[in-house]
Image (tube, helix red, strand yellow):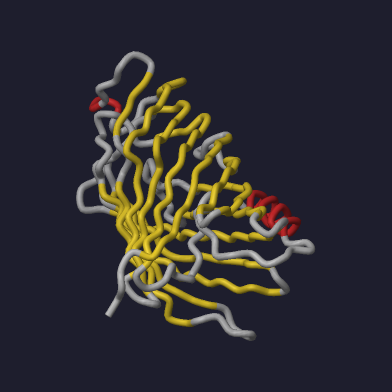
């Protein structure tokens, strides 16, 4: 993982050279900005995701995964807090390989492929420190992943997960840098009343290249320090970069991801849009 981190840091450092101002980050990145969308506002985002050589350790399936549409809705309930709902309506895996795994006996597969809904994520973000000249903005985020995808499809594990993270963001010399660090609690699908506790972390950078355009990049990873690692709780690492363009209040994006471990997709692509609008008045 150390080589992966150094590689990611070098790429992100290159993005920061001579960078104009950048806005708070969302799609196509995963790193969560501590800034919230604002009271009475709603953010809607959706797109198309493709991951080549995606691997599901609990079911032993490997293949090319499409998700349509990966989407999210965020609701600004106050000037410092928002509620988030994220998930995908449909995902399909074109199977290229299969190995023995804990859920292999449960699989009910069509010929050469499997499909299901994506798991739903429910979260809340609260900013407790606003950004100033000599300090970053800071927030906390809590989220729960619900087990909507079934273990019979091989795309789910019928276990609930929980994440708690600290979000830090700072604009320095017209460069927006955001860091997330926290804990991921994974339900253990192979053992009753057991769980895996992982460290999760990410670092992102955004820079503007025109009045409406931005170049973005990030490194996202997780680490499991247990002596015995449960299938599905392994170390992970992803490098993602892309572009965003905002016009008429709608931001369009596209990105590419590179897996840094054997458990991550070899490569992936995403494209989509984000729309934020005033929806209601908060008393």
- Residue in view at x 50 percent, y 34 percent: 51
- Residue, far top: 111
In the current view of this chain or complex, which residue is farthest to the front?
Answer: 248
How many numbered markers are drawn?
0
As displayed, is residue 230 above or below residue 2?
above
x, y percent for residue 100: 36, 26
Q: Is residue 245 above or below residue 232?
A: below
Which residue is located at x 34 percent, y 70 percent?
A: 40
Towards the viewer: 133 or 204: 133
Picture coordinates of residue 210 (x, y %)?
71, 57
Q: Is residue 191 left or right of residue 125?
A: left
Percent coordinates x, y for residue 216 in the rendering? 63, 54
The structure residue drawn at horizontal position 30% and vertical position 57%, both measured from the top left corner, is: 122
- Residue at image location 23% in from the left, 27% down from the top: 106
* Viewer-closest of 13 and 275: 275
Answer left or right for 259 relative to 97.
right
Q: Position of residue 130 (x, y in %)?
A: 50, 81
Q: Is residue 118 above or below residue 145?
A: above
Image quadrant where residue 279 sits: bottom left
Q: Where, by quadrant of the figure, is residue 219 drawn? A: bottom right
Q: Name the quadrant of the C terminus.
A: bottom left
């Amino acid at each position: 993982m150390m080589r992966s981190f150094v590689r990611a840091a070098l790429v992100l450092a290159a993005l920061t050279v001579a960078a104009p101002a950048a806005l708070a980050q969302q799609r196509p990145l995963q790193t969560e900005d501590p800034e919230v969308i604002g009271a009475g506002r709603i953010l809607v985002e959706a797109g198309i995701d493709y991951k080549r050589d995606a691997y599901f350790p609990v079911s032993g399936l490997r293949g090319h995964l499409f998700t349509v549409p990966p989407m999210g809705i965020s609701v600004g309930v106050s000037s410092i807090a928002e509620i988030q709902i994220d998930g995908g309506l449909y995902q399909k895996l074109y199977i290229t390989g299969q190995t023995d795994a804990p859920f292999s006996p449960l699989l009910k597969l069509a010929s050469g492929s499997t499909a299901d809904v994506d798991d739903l994520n429910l979260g809340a973000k609260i900013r407790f420190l606003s950004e100033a000249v000599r300090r970053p903005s800071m927030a906390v985020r809590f989220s729960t992943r619900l087990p909507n995808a079934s273990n019979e499809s091989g795309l789910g594990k019928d276990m609930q997960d929980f994440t708690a993270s600290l979000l830090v963001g700072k604009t320095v010399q017209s460069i927006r840098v955001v860091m997330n660090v926290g804990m991921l609690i994974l339900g253990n699908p192979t053992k009753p009343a057991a769980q895996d506790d992982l460290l999760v972390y990410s670092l992102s950078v955004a820079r503007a290249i025109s009045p409406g355009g931005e170049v973005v990049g990030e490194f996202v990873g997780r680490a499991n320090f247990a002596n015995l690692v449960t299938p599905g709780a392994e170390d992970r690492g992803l490098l993602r970069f892309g572009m965003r363009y905002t016009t008429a209040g709608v931001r369009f994006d596209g990105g590419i991801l590179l897996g840094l471990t054997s458990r991550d997709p070899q490569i992936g692509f995403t494209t989509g849009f984000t729309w934020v609008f005033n929806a209601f008045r908060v008393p």
